[in-house]
Image (cartoon, rainbow, N blue to C red):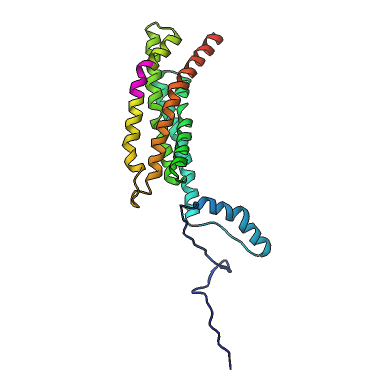
Amino acid sequence: MADFQWSKGYVALTRLDCRRVISVYAEVDEKITNADRIRQYLKNEYLPLLKREHPGLYYSLEGEGRRRKEAMSDVFKGFFIAQILIFVLLAIPLRSYVQPLIIMFAVPFGIVGAFLGHKIMGYHLSILSFFGIVGLSGVVVNDSLILVDLINRLQQQGKQDLEAVIEAARRRFRPIILTTLTTFVGLMPMIFERSLQARALIPMAISLGFGVLFATFITLVLVPCCYLILEDIKKFLA
């Protein structure tokens, strides 16, 4: 009546809008690559080629990739709102719209430091890395703030622009360096932790630690220079 043959069969047939659906799952070895690179490869190279071979094929990236994309959108919105709030909080006591921009000039360099920290430590950027960068934006402005505040007070005491900048940088050098080093040293146990329980939080600690460390040296050089440039522009316009 029939010939029998052993073969693999479907556990279940799933359909969506009358079309058969197959879900593909995979675990990623983070030591070799990360999920973002795999998703980009599938989206840009493999899946378009597969669709050309099978014109009726439709695909979408779901699961962790979709949740990560939604989470990243929320992170960028939160980062933008945080920068506006930081600007407002700085502009009110300083009574200036330009000096807060000079203080926040350290934020992009802090982000560069966070990226370099991941490269140095051998970690890929994750969603927690960007959470750390959002928090970093509120930390790196502290050094610039105390430096600019002292420059303003020295100018009010009658010192010239260059003299005030040099004295403020000299008087604030030690507090800024010590604040940065204590912050980085406090994060070191988490950065160099190798247990699986702490592995998820390490990217956040790397963003904070290396971001603050890198932005500090930029602050000590570029912020005084930007302040002098701003004063020269004011005199030129006057």
Q: Is residue 165 left or right of residue 58?
A: left
- Outermost residue to the top: 158
| Number of numbered tags placed on the structure image | 0
Residue that appears at 36% across and 29% down: 180
Relative to 16, does residue 115 appear above or below in the rendering? above
Relative to 98, does residue 123 appear above or below in the rendering? below
Q: Position of residue 52 (x, y in %)?
A: 68, 61
Question: Is residue 75 inside the magenta stretch?
Answer: no
Q: Position of residue 26 (x, y in %)?
A: 49, 61
Residue that appears at 48% across and 18% down: 225
Residue that appears at 43% across and 31% down: 214
Q: Position of residue 48 (x, y in %)?
A: 64, 57
> 81 or 219, which lies in front?
219
Quarter of the image with the N terminus is bottom right
Question: Is residue 171 inside the magenta stretch?
Answer: yes
- Outermost residue to the bottom: 1
| Range drawn in magenta | 170-176
Residue that appears at 37% across and 46% down: 201
> 122 or 112, which lies in front?
122
Dominant secondary-structure state across the stretch colored magenta = helix
Quarter of the image with the C terminus is top right
Q: Is residue 116 left or right of residue 49?
A: left
